[in-house]
Image: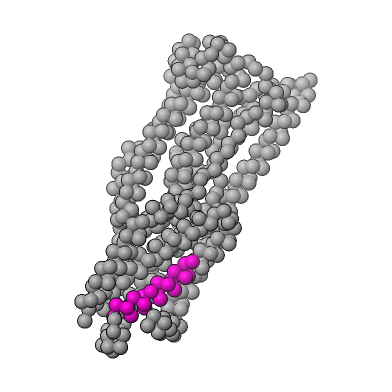
Amino acid sequence: MWKTVFAHEWQLFRRSKLLVGGLLFLLLTGAYGLYAGHAFAQTQRAVLRGIDASQAARLTKHLARFRADTLTDAGKRDWRWAHDAVVTDRELNKIVYQPLAPLAGLSIGQRDVYPYYYPAVPWDNANEGKTTEIRNPDKLLAGNFDLAFVLIFLVPLFLIAYGHNVLSEEQEQHTYALLRVQAGSVRAVVGYKLLFRVGLTLAAVWALSGAGFLLNRVPGAQLAQMVGWLLVSLLYVGFWGAATYAVAALGRGSAFNALTLLSVWVLVLLLIPSTLNYALSQRQTDPESMRLVSLSRKKDGPWYWRMPRLTQAFQQAAPRFAQARYAPARDTSEFRFVAYVELEQQEKNAVGAVQAREQAALYEQTLGFNLLNPAYTALNACNQLAQTELNHHQDFVRAVLAYQQQRRYFSFDYDLSGKPFGRADLNKFPEFDYQSAPTSLGAVGWSAWPLLLWAVGLALFGYRRLARVR
């Protein structure tokens, strides 16, 4: 029977200019989403290449200072700078960044709202990146367009337009009685018809996904992530197919079905996410990071510059520098600078840690509502595969903070111990080696299980309800 139904559906689809046009529009929109997401990722990669180039130029310039002519004032200054570890750190102005994952161009996420590179010099702090979140208001207002947006928002609309009348068209064309007599099982015919329509929609989504993999040059090592992307697409399209099946099983007219499914679309994609976002955002105690802003602008207390109280505070904050070989009690400008920077950084880190915990708690609470929020469930799974979710940004910031301290202590060690710093020591500066671990297929399945639950539940409801349709 399924072959007959599929052949009939294909003929109906081919004769419908509206449906053919709708599918072409979906494909063209998806192609633009691929282009826009790829261009966004390429722009970020170009910025990162520019960072690498500028850092190489600064390194070359600083290396030249070791050969400076010390007979001139400028040469003496350059020679002093080259042999001072802290000044060298300042002049190199090391910038660390978060590399883009291969699938990043398919799903632009929360990670892309925040800075993806930070200076690692001693007096900068990665926690303060939150204070410059709105870097381009026009861009944030317009939003980003990518394949994930097409999948989450536009594919359901096409499926609603194509599948809402899977049963009602038979009733409205007065062929339903004949269908009941000839087919024997209305459930089977309706199921096969809807399966063809869902399958055609899914084929378009998978074709776009395959084109996205090729466009973004996703390596074979990311096979599990590509399979995960196709799996999420299957579950999300299956959820909307099951919703269409359940509404069609009510046995009402095409207009009722279309209006009901559009109401579900508004509920799932607009009302539920916005309501949850508003409710959870009210729990934030410092949504604009005003504590960090105030800390950055506050006037420094005079005790910062008083010996020995400064020495005591510094030794408590950084016990490793309490050793005798660092001679921290020296009343020198170098020690005062080092102590002030370390105390300020630790104070900012304490405030930043509180905000990071609050942010992570709210994020976990949002994930706890995935069962009520199918659209966000699918989007979160896509972002996890693309490594563009909030948790990826938080992991990166933690790595940056750890590296900043490591690099800071490296230069402080030379300044406080009085060790000579030469060209050979330049290569001993710690390197930043951060790479986010790709999301496993099992983790994707675990995060997307509410979609499967919804699809199975709605399909069972529709199957049982069709028995009552006369």
Q: Is residue 241 above or below residue 373?
A: below
Quarter occupied by the N terminus: bottom left
- Foreground residue among 394 and 202: 202
Image quadrant in which you'd find residue 78: top right
- Whether residue 190 appears in magenta in the rendering, the answer is yes
- Residue 185, compared with residue 412, is above or below; it is below
Residue drawn at x 52%, y 19% as measured from the top left: 320
Q: Examine the image and state in which quarter residue 97 appears.
A: top right
Q: In the visual, does 324 lie left or right of 281?
A: right
In which quadrant is the C terminus drawn?
A: bottom left
Q: Identify whether 306 is placed above or below 213.
A: above
Residue that appears at 55% across and 40% down: 434
User: In the image, is 24 to the left or to the right of 455?
Assistant: right
What is the x, y in percent for residue 377?
37, 55
Q: Position of residue 258 (x, y in %)?
A: 31, 73
Image: magenta residue range: 186-206
Q: Where's residue 466, x and y in %?
A: 25, 75
Question: From the viewer's perspective, is residue 445 above or below residue 251?
Answer: above
Q: In the image shown, does 175 or 95 lie closer to the viewer? A: 175
The answer to which image quadrant residue 220 occupies is: bottom right
Residue 383 visible = no
Q: Is residue 202 magenta?
A: yes
Which one is nearer the viewer's eye here, 435 or 28?
Answer: 435
